[in-house]
Amino acid sequence: MQHIDTAEQGDPHLHADLKKHVRTYMLVFGSLMVLTLVTVGLKYLHLPTVPAILVALAIALVKGSLVACYFMHLISERKLILILMLATVFFFFGVLLGPTITELNEINPIH
Amino acid sequence: MTDVSTHAHPETAAHAHGDAHLEHHQLGFWRHYVFSTDHKMIGIQYAFTGLLFLLFGFSLMMLMRWNLAFPGKAIPLLGKILGDTRMPGGSMLPEFYNQLGAMHGTIMVFLGVVPLAVGGFGNFVVPLQIGAPDMAFPRLNMFSYHAYFWGGVVMLGSFFVPGGSAQGGWTSYPPLSDILPTGQTLWILGMLFLITSSLLGAVNFITTIIQLRAPGLTFWRLPFFVWAQFVTSFLLLLAFPALQAAGIMQLMDRVAKTSFFLPQGLVVSGQVLKVSGGGSPLLWQHLFWFLAHPEVYVLILPAMGIVAEVIANNTRKPLWGYRPLVFSVLAIGALSFVVWAHHMFMTGMGTVMSTFFQTTTMIISIPSVIILTCLILSLWGGSIRFTPPMLFALAFLPMFGIGGLTGLPLGLASPDIHFHDTYYVIAHFHYVVAPGTLFALFAGIYYWYPKATGRYMSTRLGQLHFWPSLVFINGVFMPMFIQGLAGMQRRLYDGGASYTHTAHVLWLHKVISFSAWGLGLSQIPFIINFFWSKRHGALAPANAWDATTIEWSAPSPPPHGNFEVQPVAYRGPYEYSVPDHPGDFFPQSEPGPETVSPIPGTPHPAHA
Amino acid sequence: MSTAAIPYTVDARPDTGLNNVKLGIWLFLSSEVMLFGSLFAGYILLRTGNPAWGAGSELLSIPLATLNTIVLITSSVTMVMSWVAAMERNLKKLRLYMGATVGLGAVFMVVKSFEYAAKFEHHHPPSYSTFMACYFTFTGLHALHVLAGMCVNFYFGFPGAKMMQTDPQQFANRVEVAGLFWHFVDLVWIFLFPVLYLLNFGPPVSH
């Protein structure tokens, strides 16, 4: 996919590419709306605790990825940025959450 | 900006001061000195403010040392000035001692060392060393400095509110910090400012180093100082937000009466606290140390960077083990995020967590030792010049060695049972930060002063500063190991005088206090030197130390924009004593054949 | 070539493929991930460590929050359309979509203030329980970010839109970067919404 932000204004490909982008944005918008309604609807299924958390977080992850990949252009962005964000996410989950959860499990086991 | 002038002559003669001023388009006082967007001015602002805070924080400690040497005794003059709320009859109240302790730590770490090491040296040197005209975001840089400065003002202001300043240690552990007087809230507000300053600064440094390197300056040709600042910035970027979050929660606890850190049923002064409860004091500790451990690497890495530069320059040899140094600093950066709970071994931690953190803590000592070893081996076979910067850099090596080695028992849970919260801990970390980092920062000041001012600092005054400081600083911290081994607790305002098990080491408090005051007096030659040399120091050429890195090819002081012609890097950063090359150094940005620092023990490429 | 001009402010550096602001904003966003991440980590530690946590979601209005979610997601679409407008150098379109983005942000803030007011009215301030403490702190910090984003977007949509005439590519870059921040704020809400509003069920604890 051509890097739109470095293209010149008079570039004939620019407008065509932007139109393609706009179509993608609308598709993503629709998906996000549907997923939002699904998330809320699932609450009324009254699932047990652990599956409920997992499903809700999974849907949130999908929605978040859609926003990040398409609205934030992450899917067409340079590898450098992708690596930075993946590293950050790794740091957060693996590093801050991991040992903290381990400690909790010894105090109040969730099994 | 990709123009490569092959006939560039980076060794342009030092511009007269007049030229430099013409380039400023006649900026007024405020735009030039207060709201500057030039990285050099901002660096000097950070350095100056940082040094003032270091002096202030040191003075707080010198005051504490009186009470430790002579518990309860009235202080001659200061008692009257500080008034009855702090020192009735000249005798220090325990609450005031605690204020001094908490603020000494906070000021030294957050308002002194980091601003000087990162804000000061980083801002001034990094763009010059990578051949850039300025930082990537000059206005953001200015904003960062002001966030720091005003955060510092808020912090200092906390001394003057009823109840005094923060007094729960620099670590501000709840539940105590949740119920302390107003000064603690100001501490939190000050920290929020400081953290914002550092976060934005980190964004600036990382972008600058990645994007603004001169043509030919690949990552593997970067001076080690730049690598150190690069890793440091990542530590600040990713670790500080945890303390920002914790600070916000503690602010909510104090102001909105929430219970993030307050357990149910907490009894204060005989009464149950009327809060919802359900909070966890351990949550603060986790978030605080998640920052504060990487923070200590923020304190040491720029210092190691400075020492590396000074050693390479004053041995007239390339650094030994450039690649191991780089890999080690990267490893330290990554590992520093997974060792934090070694500050929490005594919190009732389970064995799984304890084993994990002991293991990671032991592992992180390896790259630290590699760095120290490479720096020491860099001396081997060198033509050592004992300039003032080199004196401080040399002293750094054994001092950091002591600090690092004494950390090992603290990183293992079983000896930590004995050492936690004793004077042993104080001795350990001060060895790393005081004769460690602080000496390295002094080395940096003596080293880069000619670049910033066009004049050398006086060598004689430098020696008068160095030798007494070295003696006294050891006099302050070495005895603390002995006191800690005897079980003397830290943060006691009478220095443990009310306990029998430490009675036999109480006398050491007097040794330490007199050494501390001697250390204070030893800084006078430095202060005089710093100001006197600006006008009367010996004139220095642009390349004051016959150094190789790119900053030395700019005029002293560099004009706005730094370089008349964009520098290009042709070789590695430490091409000293290159065979078949005239003189004993080959500057990085001087046109000529490309060379690479030889691996010790193998023939130089020129001979291959 | 002026040595005072900073390279790669608009054009991308060849070997990294990025201009300075884009790298800068992603770095800033990674610190924001750690900030909100720390809050989430705190929430998890508090909730799992406290058997008396009790139901919190019952105290909140799911319909209002669902509305807010839809509002923010829509504002993300209008934001990215503003960037398209900037790339097309279309001032009218830019004003339209930026105005919509700021307007939707304002709707979010108004709904939020209704929610907060209702909480205080029913005697559920932050000090009521650890859950309410989390609710107010997390959504409050998020709301401050929404406010900041609104100010930046308003500036680029209206007083700052002059730059589209003088330096169109730099302007488009800045709108894109402002958009990245705005999308991130939306992203945080996408996680906050289920965690606070949908997952805190259980027997309520008597106070």
Image (tube, coloured by chain):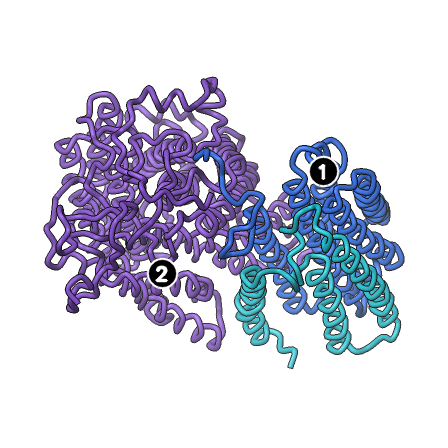
Q: CA distance from mark 1 to mark 2?
A: 41 Å
In the figure, is residue B291 to the left or right of C162? left
Q: Which residue is mark 2?
A: B329
- Chain that is blue in the image: C
Q: Image point 21% across, 36% down: which residue?
A: B544
Residue C99: give x, y in percent of width and height: 82, 40
Eye-nearest disc, 1 or 2: 1
Residue C84: give x, y in percent of width and height: 76, 49
Q: Amino acid at mark 2?
A: Val
Q: Image point 58% across, 50% down: which residue?
A: C28
Q: Is residue B53 above or below residue B577?
A: above
- Secondary structure beneath label 1: helix
**Image quadrant where residue B96 sits:** top left
- Chain that is purple in the image: B
- Chain that is cyan in the image: A
Residue B222: give x, y in percent of width and height: 34, 53
Residue B250: give x, y in percent of width and height: 59, 48
Q: Is residue B559 above or below residue B497?
A: above
Give the chain letter at badge 1.
Answer: C
Give the chain letter at badge 2.
Answer: B
Q: Which residue is mark 1?
A: C156
In the figure, is residue B358 to the left or right of C137? left
Q: Is residue B80 visible?
A: yes
**Image quadrant where residue B408 sits:** bottom left
